[in-house]
Amino acid sequence: MPELPEVEVSRRGISPHIKGQTIARWVIRQRQLRWPIPEAVEQSRGLRITDIRRRAKYLLLDTDAGSIILHLGMSGKLRVVDATLPAEKHDHLDLVFTNGQCLRLNDPRRFGACLWQFKDEQHELLQNLGPEPLTEDFDAGHLYLSSRNRRQAVKNFIMDNRIVVGVGNIYASEALFMAGIHPKRAAGRVGQKAYQRLTAAIKQVLAGAIEQGGTTLKDFTQADGNPGYFAQSLNVYGRKGEPCLLCGNAIQAQVIGQRNTYYCVSCQN
């Protein structure tokens, strides 16, 4: 599914095209996504998009009255196209602007979302979220203090959005490899120096993925239709049985927390 870098790439891709545009109308071809699209969304007609933000994996299209909340789910993608362009299969939603362009949501699996948040309110989905990983609020001290006495695997710990947002399955495996930490080690047994390495690794792998355009997944393309290329640089994810790039031993795979996890038994402890 699209992870934080893919969502950030989408934000950057659509922002120049829709920021400052006025909403003319909505075209809703399928109201039932992960949750039904609320009628309040359609009351945004006539409002101008003042900003496009990202919180965790949610995109927020701000107006003076509130924010449209978009989530790409497992297979969603956004494109900015001419509003007269015929809809394709799974094009469930158009946000049409007065300039004749529209923001179109395509979502084959319908696990995405389009919701509304009134100004000065916070939608329940955005409550209780941890810090953004690429901000100063996320540091080793936060991870260390939050992990004390926790027995859960450190991989599951850093994938908990209440601890830090947006560290999805691919990037958790990659960051733990870079930090030299075994993904099954109990979070409470990871020391402060190890968390310093892990914090730096999380920031590095996410920033690198964003810079290179997001990971190439079969269900994700950028707003301009070009795939990302970061998948070619993955160190461990999806490389079961292949030699570790550091020591040459075979990369191992195991299901941890119902997610495929990749690691090197020699380089991670």
Image (spheres, rainbow, N blue to C red):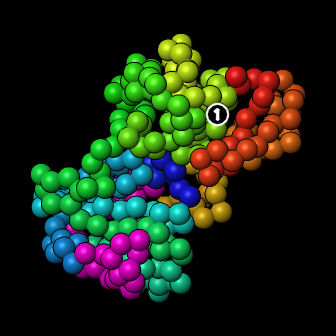
Three-letter residue code for mark 1 = Lys
**On screen, residue 132 above or below 213:** above
Q: Would you say residue 149 is visible in this rendering?
A: yes
Q: Which residue: 64% across, 25% down? A: 181
**On screen, residue 52 above or below 246:** below
Residue 22 sits inside the magenta stretch:
yes
Q: Which residue is mark 1?
A: 184
Q: Which residues are magenta?
A: 10-38
SS for callout 1: loop
Q: Residues within 10 Å of mark 1 (few under 14, many from 20)?
A: some
Q: Which residue: 52% across, 50% down? A: 3
Q: Quadrant of residue 104?
A: bottom left
Q: Nearer the viewer, residue 65 or 249?
A: 249
Q: Which residue: 64% across, 57% down? A: 217
The C terminus is located in which quarter? top right
Q: Decide if residue 107 is on the left or right side of residue 177.
A: left
Q: Nearer the viewer, residue 172 or 227?
A: 172
